[in-house]
Image (cartoon, rainbow, N blue to C red):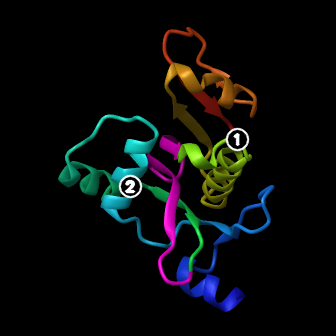
Amino acid sequence: MSELLTHLYGQQHRLCSTPAGQLTLVLSREREIDLIELEQLCDAVGWSRRPLRRVRRALQNSLLLVGLWRHDPRLPKLVGFARCTGDGIVDATIWDVAVHPLYQGAGLGKQLMAYVLELLQQQQVERVSLFADPGVVAFYEAQGWELEPLQRRCAFWYAP
């Protein structure tokens, strides 16, 4: 199974711990993100649609893309996502963190964020910021993120 997971998700994939042992969920920065699957995920979490050509360009210009996949050897399904922009040296910003509602509440969002931060630390990025909607501020605060000093917008920062 290990060889199959490496083939499908790349060398740096990581298995997620889940309360339901029958599911295999995998974090990967190497498996390509399908635009239609990403759009379906965004629909599921209630985000407004963006033109696919713009989403494609945003993904191409991102520093880091991470998918959370429900493993199926024939057709893995994208159930979570995060992307980062930045210079890859001093600063990075995390955007578009999403976990499908059917998979929320099991710690997968925390594992996704930990994986993203680990990958950024491997790149020796010095400062990481995050923009989040007001409805998910508590999720990030519980992980140690701090609200920006003026508390006028939902921006957080983290120094690895």
Q: What residue is at 40 percent from the left and 65 percent from the top?
A: 33
Range drawn in magenta: 73-98
Q: Answer above or below: position of 95 versus 114.
A: above
- Sort mark 1 into few (<14), some (14-19) or many (20+) by Cα contacts within 10 Å: few
Give coordinates of residue 60: x percent, y percent. Answer: 31, 60
Residue 82 lies in the magenta-colored region: yes
Give coordinates of residue 48: x percent, y percent. Answer: 31, 34
Disc 2 marks which amino acid? Leu
| Disc 1 secondary structure class | loop
Label drawn at residue 38: 2
Q: CA distance from mark 2 to mark 1?
A: 20 Å
Prevailing SS of the magenta stretch: strand
Residue 79 lies in the magenta-colored region: yes
- Sort mark 2 into few (<14), some (14-19) or many (20+) by Cα contacts within 10 Å: many
Direction from residue 4 to residue 30 in the image, left or right? left
Q: Which is nearer the N-term, disc 2 or disc 1?
A: 2
Q: What residue is at 70 percent from the left and 41 percent from the top?
A: 105
Question: Which residue lies under the disc numbered 1?
Answer: 105
Disc 1 marks which amino acid? Gly
